[in-house]
Every structure is written in structure tokens, then in C-alpha cells.
Image: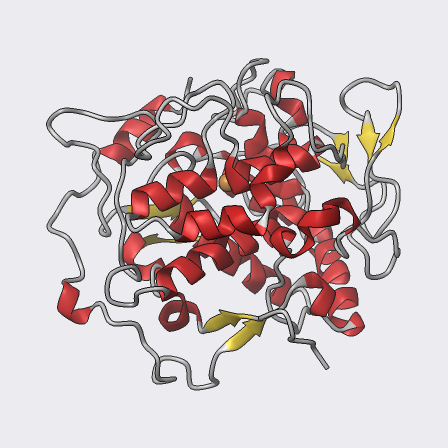
Amino acid sequence: MKSSVILAAAAAATFTSAFPTKQNRSSSHSTEDCPNGYAVRPEWSQMSKQHRKEYISALQCMMQKPSTVEETNVSSHYADINYTHQFPGQAIHFVAQFLPWHRHYVYTYHQELKECGYTGEMPFWAWDWNADDVFNSSVFDADPECGLGTNGTLAEEGPLNAFAVTNGGLANHTIEFPYNHVFQRNLQTLPKGAPQPLDRFIQPAEVEKALSFDVYEYFHRYVEGAPPQEPLKDIPGMEGEMGFAGMHGGIHRMIGGDMGGILAHIESPDWCPSFTATESSNDGANSSPQDPLFFLHHANVDRVWAQWQDQSLEDNMYAFGGWTYHNYTTESGVGKATLNDTMRFGYLTDPVPVHHAMDYRKAYCYVYADKDYREA
Ligand SMILES: [Cu+2]
């Protein structure tokens, strides 16, 4: 894998003493850092029609903006944003910084939407609120002006066009990363290779279970899930469980298509360094931000993490631990993740240390809506 050199370099990054100390870890519950107060991130169903419309227009705007990344063969800024997620590969998945990395990435994506005229807050998709009938969630909307599209349509045209999404604001959109193909979804609760129905992972009881862990590493692994071919590790009482997709991985695979890494078996183009193409790998899922549901899904993962953090501002807000990249463990402890580790976002935005992303209110000035919230 070509990216191993980059990953090794990332692993060798600073391992200085833990920061911040417990004394300065308290969460900001004043609006000192946020002169305009806290923004409320809504569930997609709670958004005003105007905001949903603007959201779709902003996606189309990002698709029309030219790429600023010379190293790739893509033309749009929308593809640049995906490249940011593709490039670090296993340095940001199945590792300690999975949660803070994706928090900062979703935040950055919201800034990009705003540059394209979106005036609302970053929405989330609460699959746990829709667990009884998840594929009827409001995010699956065929409306051409304000919908994110429904399931794809099966066509016998090979993997590049097999489950094209033919309605909603991005209908038949050609995604150019890492290869030109039509934007796809293949909704199912029991996809090929899954040992059990995946909708178990989005039940409110699963969220409750995740929130019951008192160690960051256990909470994180339970939420992210393990790769399909690997046993779950390091959660007391659950070691060795196979096929534990978790609420993060379970939703990716239930949505399928671009979200599920349908391109995993197609060979990588030369210019795309971390796109490893093997049938058994789920690395193809690294191109999943092509489906805008990615960001709504990850905002919900972030909401669950925020809930976990809020359970104990003292103990959980800056709780962090684990390893710096996938399956990298050593006796000496080299590769142990710390709050000082750097998170990299390629050409999209500046690197930030992990600790920057921990206290979401303080760093980003948002909170999540509860079930009764509605935008005006
Ligand atoms: Cu990811």
C-alpha cells in the first residue's frame, strides 16, 4: 500500500506530554468563546424548506466549483473534499482520532456549504430516531429542489452505474472520484457478507449501550465498529466478536453504493494513493463522502459522541486514547494516541491538534437539537 510511508510518518509525529491538564479541561458553558451563542444543529426533518433548498443548491455549487488540488485528475471542489477523506485512509479510521477527525471534517464541510450560499446550520440524520423504519427517514426524499434522493435503481450496466440515484437534487450526478461513475445507493439491512441484519446497530438501545462505556477507547470502538473481516478488539467482554459493524459502519453498509464502498473491487487510478482495491477490503468506503448522506450520518455519530462527552464534562470531554493507526500497536507504547496528535486535512484546511476538536461547544459553537426542535 503506497500510503504506508505517509502513515508511518504520521505515526512518528509528536508524542509529548498529555495536554491539556485536568485543571484546564472544563467545558465552556458560558458563551465566552461564542459571542453569537451556540448554533443548533437540526435533524434533516426539522429543517425549514428554505434551508433544505439552500443545502441542495450549495451541493450543486460545490460540484461546479473548480478543483484546487493539482495532484488529482478531478475537476470539481466537491471531489477535492472527498479526496481529503480518501488520502489519509487508515490513519483516520479504526484509530483514536476517528471521532475528532470526522468532527473537524464535518465542521469544515459546513464552512464550504456556507461559501456556497447555505445559511443554515449543519444538519444530522438521526437514524436512531428512525430505527423502526429507517429507509423511510426524511433524508430519502425525491424532491428535485430540496431532497437528497431515494434508493438507487438497479441497472445491468456494471458496477459504475448499477444503483444510480435517479431522483432528488443530485439525480444522476456523475461522481468523478476516484473514477467517473453515477452516484449510487443500494439500501438494505442485510447486505452480502453481513453475518446478521445491520439495523440492530441503529436501535436506541445500541446508543444507550455505547453511552454506558466509561472509557473513550471502548466507546469509540463500539460506535465506529470493526472492519468487516476483523474481530472486534479491546472492549471488555466483546473481544473477538466478528462482523461487529457498529452504528457508524452499519449505516455505511446499509446505505451501500458510494456510502458502502461499492468501488472497492475496482482498481485504483495511479494518482489516488490510498485507494487499495481488493474484494475483501472496505477501503473503497473511503470515497463515501460523495454521498451527501455521509456528512449527515457523521454529524449523528458526532451527536452520540457529544452526548457521551456531556455525561461527564470533567471526565469525558477531553477523554481520548487508543492508537495512531489501524492495527498499529507496540509493546513500547510507540503509536499511542495523545491529545497532541496532529489531524491533517490535505488541501482543504490547516492541520489541527486533536485537543482542538474535543470541546465542541468551545471550538465550534454548536449544540444538537432535541426531538422537539423545529426550524421556523
Ligand atoms: Cu471516514
Residue shown at 22%/51% (left/top)? 340
Q: Is residue 109 left or right of residue 343?
A: right
Q: Is residue 304 left or right of residue 94?
A: right
Camera-side residue of 105 and 270? 105
Q: Is residue 242 left or right of residue 341?
A: right
Place of residue 58 in the rendered image (x, y in percent of width and height, measured from the top left): 71, 61
Camera-side residue of 80 and 150? 150
Residue shown at 60%/49% (left/top)? 297
Q: Is residue 167 placed above or below 261 in the rendered structure? A: below
Camera-side residue of 51 and 115? 51
Residue 313: quarter of image: bottom left
* Quadrant location, the N terminus: top left
Q: Is residue 20 left or right of residue 55?
A: left
Place of residue 3 in the rendered image (x, y in percent of width and height, measured from the top left): 40, 25
Residue shown at 48%/78% (left/top)? 38
Place of residue 373 in the rendered image (x, y in percent of width and height, measured from the top left): 64, 75
Q: Is residue 81 visible?
A: yes
* Quadrant location, the C terminus: bottom right
Q: Is residue 97 visible?
A: no
Q: Is residue 106 placed above or below 373 in the rendered structure? A: above
